[in-house]
Amino acid sequence: MTTETERLRDRVAAELLRARDRTVRLTEAVDEGDLVAQHSPLMSPLVWDLAHVGNQEELWLVRDVGGREPVRRDIDELYDAFKHARRDRRALPLLNAAEARRYVAQVRDKALDVLDHARLDQGRRLVADGFAFGMIVQHEQQHDETMLATHQLRAGPPVLSAAAPPSPSSVVTGEAFVPGGPFTMGTSTEAWALDNERPAHQVLVPGFHIDRAAVTNAAYAAFIDAGGYDDPRWWSTPGWNHRQEAGLVAPAHWQRDGRGWAATTFGRTEPIVPDEPVVHVGFHEASAYAAWAGKRLPTEAEWEKAARWDPATGRSRRYPWGDESPSPHHANLGQQHLRPAAAGAFPAGASPLGVHQLIGDVWEWTSSDFHGYPGFAAFPYREYSEVFFGPDYKVLRGGSFGTDRSAVRGTFRNWDYPIRRQIFTGFRCARDA
Ligand code: AVJ
Ligand code: FE
């Protein structure tokens, strides 16, 4: 076997370890009562996410790739996300915290043994280039971000901390113009890209303007102060209905603070930071803001063209800054900071057209419904993405401060219901040329 294959095997093992370190940090931060509690009807108990991560690893790496005997076949049903709604999981006979920790450790030992013997250089498509391992790394990191969102919804004194994000030397404002013409959307070559990112295909995108930075807390507060939440002109019909029924008046976790606003972030209440991206807004709020500002949300194709299209060569990059994997100077990813960074804090991560922080900070709502690309084929299972295709889900792009670098790239697609704002969601605006 080549040294290149051995390097891949080492990289896979390191990524599995890095994901598990994060899972451990998120689940050690609280006591058993907090691990089994239902912090929100929108979220699973943390102890469910923990064992579910192990169960998916068992299903795909131990049983499917490895062809080994099950570790715990009896618990598959409990940890099948399609069998029980998040709000109902608390009442199931789940593994307790000690049992869940023992289970995930047993599975990991076997998965590493499977990795040692796997033919990453040939054979089954599931195994080639370490895809199944990469899928499981991304799955654990996705659940780590979900657990981080659960931490944000948890009441009580803070248990997580991190350094403040870097501040910009100059704040980025204004728009970039993206010229019209074809660009290559999606990928057929990115080894660990998931099925919904495939295949690469040409899309003709007319010229448009896009904000160089995500909408800030200050800009969003101006929308509130201008009566944006009370004026149905800015809202779609379903958006206005939801605003009324849910009694929305501001982003989640905001409260009035004298004449301004404060936000509670992982248990700490502080005045909002004007130049940081707004976070915890739903699609309907984002769309209403854009209408008020005389703009609109970008389509998914526009977002990806702004993030990947290189005007010098016409080709699509892996990331806005080029083809190198993210490092800490490119983007605010991986829970290094517990909040998005102000506009301009990552100049090294800007796109060739000068669009900043497309990767990291906040997931960005697009105006697009979640659908398969032309030539889509579910792989390796329909339940990863295909069953969610349709008009009910909106696409989010770019990842947040809570997204690991292994679980986001220029082609990565996330999705959620338009009313959801428990994940780390913000947006930027666009407009026609
Ligand atoms: C792609 C983030 C929408 O968390 O529901 C986790 C990822 N899929 N387990 C989700 C996922 C199965 C998924 N999102
Ligand atoms: Fe999952």
Image (cartoon, helix red, strand yellow):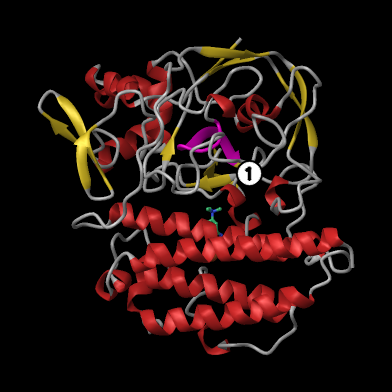
Q: Which residue is drawn at 81% across and 21% down?
A: 313
Asked if residue 364 is among those painted magenta in the image, a careful observer would answer yes
- Tell me if residue 68 can be seen: yes
Callout 1 secondary element: loop
Measured as percent of width and height from the top left, residue 320 is found at: 64, 30
- Compared across the picture, whether 69 is left or right of 327 comes to right
Q: Residue at x 48, y 38 (%)?
A: 332
Asked if the magenta segment contains residue 350, the reply would be no
Side of 178 where 377 appears, left or right: right
The answer to whether residue 2 is above or below residue 278 is below
In depth, the one of 251 and 294 nearer the eye is: 251
Range shown magenta: 358-369
Task: Name the residue tied to disc 1.
Answer: 412
Tell me the quarter of the image containing the N terminus.
bottom right
Task: Indicate the position of residue 301 as horizontal and vertical percent values.
Answer: 66, 30
Position of the C terminus, as image quadrant, is top right
State whether residue 107 is above or below residue 88. Answer: below
Image x and y of residue 374, in percent:
78, 42
In the displayed structure, does residue 198 sit left or right of residue 352? right
Residue type (three-letter) at the residue carrying disc 1: Phe
